Image: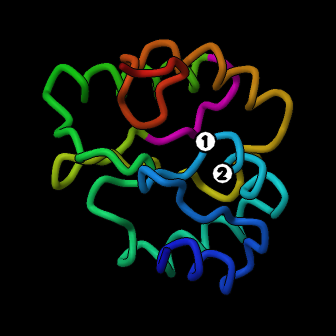
């Protein structure tokens, strides 16, 4: 609840509260973040990161990202570079999590980026953060 409240107070007015399982409904989260600029969403996420629940926004226990998972994320970043975003950076890994520090010069809301992301997310195994597939 504290994370959701923080996100709303930092400029994402429609950020949803967690559901009964403690997770944030994915589509409601996407809708709330897409309703504001990517710079506003990133600023709110940075401001509220310390309030992120241990299980992330899914409400599930955090899974440690393995060396193989890291390779899959690196392949996805390379894929984005090959699909028209040559400046897309490799993700960073710390504490068993992944972080994409996308530069503000890349419009993550553009149709071109969303199309490339849809293709490249398939390289990330289902169930991991930012995978294009539902996990189990």
Q: Residues within 10 Å of mark 1 (few under 14, many from 20)?
A: few
Residue 82 picture location, percent across and down: 59, 17
Q: In terms of image quadrants, where is residue 116? A: top right
Check disc 2 and report the residue beneath it.
Answer: 29
Render colour scheme = rainbow
Q: From what the image shows, is residue 29 above or below residue 73?
A: below
Q: From what the image shows, is residue 103 above or below residue 48?
A: above
Q: Secondary structure at mark 1?
A: helix
Q: From the viewer's side, name the closer residue of 47 and 85.
A: 47
69 on left or right of 52: left
Q: From the viewer's side, name the closer residue of 39 and 136.
A: 136
Q: Are marks 1 and 2 in contact (CB under 8 Å)?
A: yes
Q: From what the image shows, is residue 5 above or below residue 114?
A: below
Q: Residues within 10 Å of mark 2 (few under 14, many from 20)?
A: some
Residue 113 picture location, percent across and down: 74, 31
**Number of numbered discs visible in the structure rendering:** 2
Query: Looking at the rendered structure, which numbered label has been put on residue 131?
Result: none
Q: In terms of image quadrants, where is residue 67? A: top left
Q: From what the image shows, is residue 5 above or below residue 90?
A: below
Q: From the viewer's side, name the closer residue of 83 and 29.
A: 29
91 on left or right of 65: right
52 on left or right of 18: left
Q: Which residues are magenta?
A: 83-89
Residue 71 picture location, percent across and down: 26, 22
The Cα atoms of the two marked residues, 1 and 2, are separated by 5 Å
**Residue name at image x 43 percent, y 46 percent:** 58
**Residue name at image x 53 percent, y 60 percent:** 18
Check disc 1 and report the residue beneath it.
Answer: 26
């Amino acid at each position: 609840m504290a994370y959701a409240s923080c996100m709303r107070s930092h400029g994402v007015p429609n950020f949803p509260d967690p559901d009964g399982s403690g997770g944030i409904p994915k589509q409601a989260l996407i809708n709330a973040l897409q309703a504001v600029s990517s710079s506003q969403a990133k600023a709110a996420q940075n401001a509220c990161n310390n309030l992120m629940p241990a299980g992330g926004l899914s409400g599930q226990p955090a899974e440690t990202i393995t060396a193989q998972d890291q390779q899959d994320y690196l392949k996805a970043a390379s894929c984005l570079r090959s699909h028209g975003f040559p400046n897309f950076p490799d993700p960073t890994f710390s504490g068993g999590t992944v972080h994409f520090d996308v530069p503000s010069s890349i419009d993550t809301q553009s149709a071109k980026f969303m199309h490339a992301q849809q293709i490249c997310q398939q390289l990330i195994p289902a169930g991991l953060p930012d995978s294009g597939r539902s996990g189990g």
